Each structure stands twice: as C-alpha cells, then as structure tokens.
Image (cartoon, helix red, strand yellow):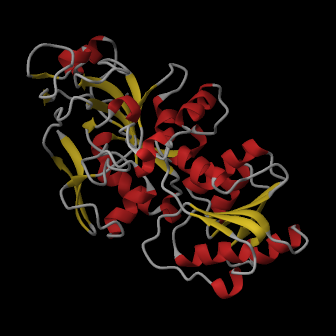
Amino acid sequence: MKGFVFHGPGQSAWEDVPDPAIKEPTDAIVRVDEVTICGTDLHILKGDVPEVHPGTVLGHEAVGEIVEVGGDVRSVRPGDRVLVSCISACGRCRYCRERSYGQCRGGGGWILGHLIDGTQAEYVRVPHADLSVHALPAAVASRDAVLLADIFPTAYEVGVLNGRVSPGDTVAVVGAGPIGLAAIATAHLFAPERIIAVDLDPARLETARRFGADAVAHVEEAPEQLVADLTDELGADVVIEAVGVPESFELCTRMVRPGGHVANIGVHGRPATLHLEDLWIRNITITTGLVDTYSTPTLLRMAATGRLPTTQLVTHTFPLDRMEEAYDVFSRAADTGALKVVLGGEQHEVAVGTAGGGGCGPRATRRMRMCWGGGPAARAAAGSPPGAPGSA
C-alpha cells in the first residue's frame, strides 16, 4: 500500500510501505477514508519530536471502515464506520483507569504516527481497538468526524477544561490556527463574558471572529494592553496558548490575571523562559497536557446535532495520493489560507495477515475488499467513479 513516510528532519515521501497486519488480538485494521494533517506532524518534520524514527508512517487522525479485527475485539466488527482516535488506550493501567489515556502505560497513549505507523496511509493498524476507535453515527459526515480525532478534543480538554473556563470569564486565545479556533468554539460552551483572539495573521483573526471571538488583536498591536483595557487592568481569567513557540507562551504569562490560568496546548520544540521572578507572587496556575480524548463521545454527540463548527475549519481537500501537495499547502498557511486540509482516499485492494485471529473470513491471508465488498469495480457499478477526488 501507500503511506506518507518520515525519513528524518525535512525528508518525507508518499511511497510504498508494508501492508498492515493484525499483531495482537486487540488490534483492528482500518481502511482509511478520510485523514487530515496536524500541526504536530509539521513539528515532526522539523525534527521537534525526536522519538519519531525515520521510516515511520505519519498521521494520528482518521475516519475509515473496519476491515479486520483481532480475536479479542468486541466493540467493533468489519464493516463498521469508525473514528480513529489520536490516542490509544489499553484500558487497564493506572492512567487509563483515571481517564488519562494520553499517559497510558499499557502500550497506548500517542503512538500512531509517533511510535508506530500512523494513519496517513491507505490502511492502518489500530492497537487496543475497543477503546481506540469510536463507531460513528450516520448523522456525522466523515469530513466532520475526522476533526474529532484530535483537534476538537485537544482544544476542549487541554485548553478549555484544563484552563477551567467558567461563566463570565475573560478568555484570551493566543494563536488563531485550527487548534485556537477550536478552543474559541468550545470555550463558548461555558458562557464566558468575552473571548479575545491574538494572532499574527489578519485573515485568521477575521476567522476567529466568525468562530466567536468578541475582540481580536494582532500580536504586534499591544494585545496585553487590549486585555488590560477590557478587564479593568486585571488581565484574563484564562489564557490559552495555541502556537507552541517561546514568545507566545511568555505572552500568555503576561496577559493572565493574578489567580488565573494559563493552559498550554502548543507543541514546543524550544525552551521558553518562565519568569518566576514576576509570577511567584501572582497565584498563577499553568497547565500542560497531551489530550486524553475522554471527551470524544460527548463531542461526537454534539457534532451529530450540529453544535460544533467542524465544517468551517476545512479549507482544502485532496485525494489521498496528493499527500505531499497537501502538506505543502498546510505548511504554507500564511500564503495559502489553509486551516485544516482533509484527504479522502481511493479504496485499494490490500492483502492483510490475520495472525491475531478474528476478522471476516477463515483464511489467514485474504484481500481486504472481500471483507467489505467494495473495490473499484463495485463502486463503479454503484455509480461512483474509481478514484474520485474526495470520495469516502
């Protein structure tokens, strides 16, 4: 099959990779129908995440169809349409029992596209499938659902909930990229008095207004003063860092009021200075976090009733085999206006091993399309041209 492979900082390619196979009885194989690119993937390509070894297929977000399951999988079966979460969870370790799935010590956590091959491929092996994929309601389109694999749970859990946004708060969001916009949207669930968006890009600031920001500030136009003016010099109750550079984090610590919260979402590749000489006396709470995705079922229910602005975040769509072009567009967001790019792939015939048992047939190796009954010929017979861009 094809996959997008990291070969070291600045080096990557859409190329042939081994077909996935069941390795453990708790695994599932998913045919990828929709996948997206995360800002974390760009950090990996820059070399900011050294745990990712050359040769790894990137990606940790997808929507697709189960085509194979191990013998111990109980919650899904071949043919089910599922959301592949960015976080895998064993369900048994101490952290999983505390719903801290991102810190799983039983072979889960953030592993897809990080420690094992990820979702930016035609098929992906998902460990611990019972807790790591979510069956999708028919009311949620794949293009909307894929944004619930990472971006919305991350913004909601690591930004809004960790920041303890409450009714009547002033919330400042530094960074109006996809994660910052999702934080603005989900902060509204808690009825803050106002939300202030800060960014370098005027176009993104206008988008932030559409997502619910009450005020916006260019980073070079004294955002600290704007926050002070709007809060009688107190500062923001909650400041959410959604960029991942030292300057943005340090700006957040200057904008927060005494007793307030700074919730860091951004992925940082360089050290930031923590000015404790100023902060020690101000009762500041600073939180960091890797998303746990415990909120995904709730967010899925909200998406099914149209209460999340998922569609508004998707600015570009591509067929799956134009992954390199999609990365280029996403990485040059200032020039292209990209927020989220979503790729939809053609359904390909791939041989899959079933060493873990289970699945939809008795043979140890078989063609995937025999499990789900939909190769290019079947789609053509149904009126859908093979390889149609964006088909799912």
Residue 77, percent across and down? 32, 18
Q: Point out the residue furthest to the bottom here.
A: 277
Residue 30, position in %: x, y?
29, 30
Q: Splitting the image into 4 quarters, where does residue 52 fall? A: bottom left
**Residue 18 at what x, y percent from top left?**
12, 42
Number of on-image labels: 0
Question: Does residue 184 appear left or right of residue 88 in this picture?
Answer: right
- Residue at 58% from the left image edge and 78% from the top image edge: 247
Displayed quadrant of residue 223 = bottom right
The quadrant of the picture occupied by the N terminus is top left
Left or right placement of residue 209 versus residue 271 in this view: right
> 136 above or below 370?
below
Taking 382 as reference, is 355 above or below it? below
User: Which residue sits at x=17%, y=49%?
Assistant: 15
Which quarter shows the C terminus? top left
Q: In which quarter of the image is residue 311?
A: top right
Answer above or below: position of 67 versus 229: above
Q: Which residue is pictured at 45% across the width and 58% down the height?
A: 39
Question: What residue sits 55% from the left and 83% below the top?
Answer: 273
